[in-house]
Amino acid sequence: MSESQQALTGARIGVITFPGTLDDRDAARAVRLAGGQAVSLWHADADLKDVDAVVLPGGFSYGDYLRAGAISRFAPVMDALVDAAKGGLPVLGICNGFQILTEAHLLPGSMIKNEHLAFLCKEQDLIVENVDTAWTRDFTAGQTISIPLKNQDGQFVADERTLDELEGEGRVVFRYAGTNPNGSRRGIAGISNAAGNVVGLMPHPEHAVEAGFGTDAAAGPRAGTDGLAFFTSVLGTLVTA
């Protein structure tokens, strides 16, 4: 086994569980399928257990009381995460995880109720706009991918100045293809911080990593595995860091 393969296999990706998290096991499985080592992190942990990257998975942490992600932002583990993210640690926030990242001010903007005020669950096409982040290097710019979307507070909003900055700095990572499913400003489905190590998106890549359990694809029903590239991307980033 080459040194790069050994580094990839040994990479430790933390997956944080908050009260009300639903998709932590799915995220951990995605990490393992990509070739990494999934490390369980608890919301009350004071440290990150020397992980190389972190995933904040989807769900309804603390029942989405106050606002989605508003209470989770103050969990003890977030103190360590915010400091580590500012220091360059790769962090991926999926759905509720994205909401938590905005509440923690690691990403700008906010998430509010879907425009149609209803829970949404569907397969969703996305256009990949930024392949220079820690979590997207295995995609191609302009590529269309399909992964599941399921949310109630999925409408991304920000003031016009912030939106212009995101666009101008190339920090819009994913945009909804076709119909905007939840009213997000400018069709934005995912963004990054300026350094590109922190990415948040509403759709769920961890639900499209294994043939037979993903989205419908040309290869057949449920055969889509477009989400796997998120996790191979970060492992590749860690190897070359």
Image (cartoon, rainbow, N blue to C red):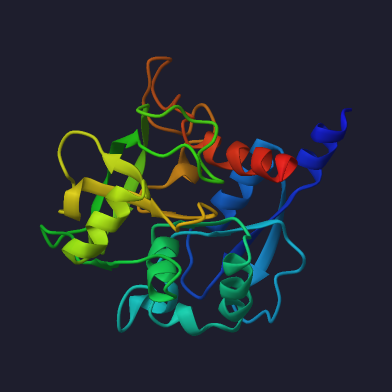
**In this rendering, position of residue 70 left or right of residue 187:** right
Position above or below: 229 against 108: above
Please identify the quarter of the rendering in which residue 45 is found. bottom right
Seen as rendered, the residue at the extreme top is 219
Q: Nearer the viewer, residue 185 or 12?
A: 185
Which residue: 65% across, 37% down?
34
Seen as rendered, the residue at the extreme left is 116
| Residue 155 appears in view | no
**In this rendering, position of residue 195 left or right of residue 15:** left
Position above or below: 226 against 171: above
- Estimate the x, y position of residue 142 in percent, counting from the top left: 35, 28
Q: Quadrant of the N terminus?
A: top right
**In this rendering, position of residue 216 left or right of residue 208:** left
Position above or below: 54 against 239: below
| Residue 117 appears in view | yes
Please identify the quarter of the rendering in which residue 197 is found. bottom right
**In this rendering, position of residue 91 left or right of residue 184:** right
Q: Nearer the viewer, residue 191 or 228?
A: 191
Which residue: 53% across, 40% down?
230
Please identify the quarter of the rendering in which residue 112 is found. bottom left
- Estimate the x, y position of residue 149 in percent, counting from the top left: 32, 46
Which residue: 13% across, 63% down?
117
Position above or below: 164 against 222: below
Q: Nearer the viewer, residue 162 or 238?
A: 162
Q: Nearer the viewer, residue 26 or 68?
A: 68
- Estimate the x, y position of residue 131 in percent, counting from the top left: 47, 37
Which residue: 76% across, 69% down?
49
Count of marks, rendered view: 0
